[in-house]
Amino acid sequence: MTELWDAFLQAIQLIVSLDKEVVEIALRSLAISTTAVILASLVCIPIGGLIHFRNFRGKRPLINIIQTFYSVPTVCVGLFVFLFISRAGPLGGLGLLFTPAAVVMGQMVLITPVLMGLTISALSGVDKAIKDSALSSGATEFQAISTIIKEARFAVVAAFIMGFGRAISEVGAAMMLGGNIRGYTRVLTTAISLETQKGELVLALALGIILIALALIVNIIVNLALQRY
Amino acid sequence: MKKIIHCLSFVIALLILVMGVVGCRPQAETPGLGKDIAGTTAFPVVTAKERFKIATTTSLYDTGLWYYLEPMFEKKYNVEMDIVYAGTGIALEYGRRGDVHAVVVHDRAAEDKFIADGYGINRRYFAYNFFIIAGPLSDPAGIKDMPPEDAFKRLAEKGNKNPEKVKFISRGDNSGTHTKEKLIWSKAGFKYEDIQKAGPWYVEAGKGMGPCLLMANEQGAYVLADISTFLAYKGKLNLVPLVEKGEIFLNVYAAIAINPDKIPTAKLQMANNFINWLISDEIQKVIGTYGVAEYGRSLFYPTAGGGCNLPNCPTVDEYSKPVQ
């Protein structure tokens, strides 16, 4: 068990000494996953809102399907996106495979169901009367939706944080789509996987601790912002 | 509404800040911000250099050889080299799909097919080493210094009798090492399908070379490994090399360019530079001395100079004639 302590010490040492490569990898992780979660949120939260507000045939099954995809294995998402963006695939011409953009795409696909599903759940928690009164006082549907999203903002932000957490902690898609190229697509999780493979267990665990620390910082920032607004 | 805009602009500012930091890679000079080459503009990694992608076998990656060679090649040809590591099977698949510009592999039969199918061109051999069977010092199956085929026979026999004591870890991942293992089983008179079903002593790990060595170490099992990865991991292992001699153990590494006739996006010129660079005197010397300081002996033998003189060694043309 001394290894756990060693890992903790090494993590602190890596953070304090600002190890160039580790800092670079950590910031890359942050940039990729933040981009993925923001881009995905811009699409998924409004769509989640629409699904919640509109009544249509097959709404229940659709929500069930979305929730089922919470459990999609990250490697399968990686494989799915891989087949699209590999040179031989339909989007092959863009040459995206083994670039950071590919990892962003994979993570976006991965967290889409979580963001949509949790948005729907969040809005379901808001009193129906708010929507009705908004609509009756002459608001457009879009205004009504944004009123309610505002009302449910804590729960929606929880969806955002959940999406970020799933994105920054996944390894399957990042490995498959980014290729763990040093200095280009290596992120914390793929670095952890590589160091584990190399038998550098303490270093791998230290990188894991750094990842958690990073997530903590993001959560604090998001929550502070939420309290201000 | 104003508040939302404030919040958004805060997030965007944060994002730009973070990306700016990531974009500035310490090693790379950064002329022409944003003048990225087509195809990678979707993400602001700042580089004006051409990108050259190779897929390399895990055994070469795990020894750290590419960490050493990569900056030398990048500097000489002013190129960003992206190295993806994968077993020979997947590496060739990446090549077939046009996702990389060159492959570095070690499975002659698979390479021949890759070239015959028109995907690969300009193969040159640049390094070789030998496989070993590593196992616990106590050697419960008693295979020390046997010929490889006989050692495998003995492992199957003892494994079936006493699977608690005698285990064999197989890569099980269609890598070059896995292909070699199958070949040895067939030379030893077994059908591989039978071995796969033989019982609990035969463990298909489905992992790279390094992880398999670590796994064998944990379980006190036998494992087929290339000597380079074994030496690179030796500090973490209690395993010892038990069988080291045998023609069948020869392991030759080849670099192959992707053929632009089949894959229009191939970068034949840079791939040729890469292959010719690998077989150049300068780099052959580097390969021949890599690891001496750390492990007391070199991890690979360079093909130059014709030191390899077993029947399956590459011919002079196959390792020294420049490609074009």
Image (cartoon, helix red, strand yellow):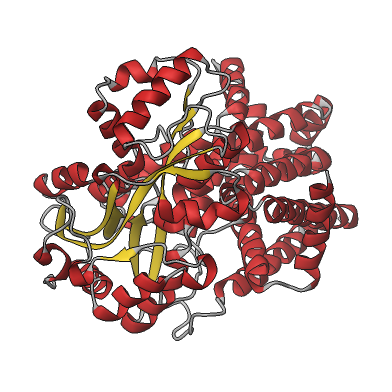
Q: For this view, does A44 lie left or right of residue B82? A: right
Q: Nearer the viewer, residue B275 or A96?
A: B275
Which residue appears at 30% of the width and 50% of the height?
Answer: A92
Which residue appears at 79% of the width and 44% of the height?
Answer: A150
**Quadrant where the N terminus of chain B lies?**
bottom right
How far across and how far down the image is residue A46, in percent? 63, 41
User: Can I make out residue B281 in this image?
Assistant: yes
User: Can I make out residue A88 in this image?
Assistant: no
Q: For this view, does B89 lie left or right of residue B166? A: left
Residue A120 falls in which quadrant of the image?
Answer: top right
Residue B137 falls in which quadrant of the image?
Answer: top right
**Quadrant where the C terminus of chain B lies?**
bottom left
Q: Is residue B27 above or below residue B12?
A: below
Which residue appears at 28% of the width and 44% of the height?
Answer: B246
Which residue appears at 58% of the width and 39% of the height?
Answer: B217
How far across and how far down the image is residue B208, in percent? 46, 43
What is the number of callouts on the image? 0
Q: Is residue A43 above or below residue B167?
A: below
Q: Nearer the viewer, residue A180 or A203?
A: A203
How far across and how far down the image is residue A204, in percent? 67, 52
How far across and how far down the image is residue B228, in percent? 43, 56
Q: Is residue A48 above or below residue B265?
A: above
Q: Nearer the viewer, residue A189 or B294?
A: B294
Q: For this view, does A189 lie left or right of residue B51? A: right
Residue A27 falls in which quadrant of the image?
Answer: bottom right
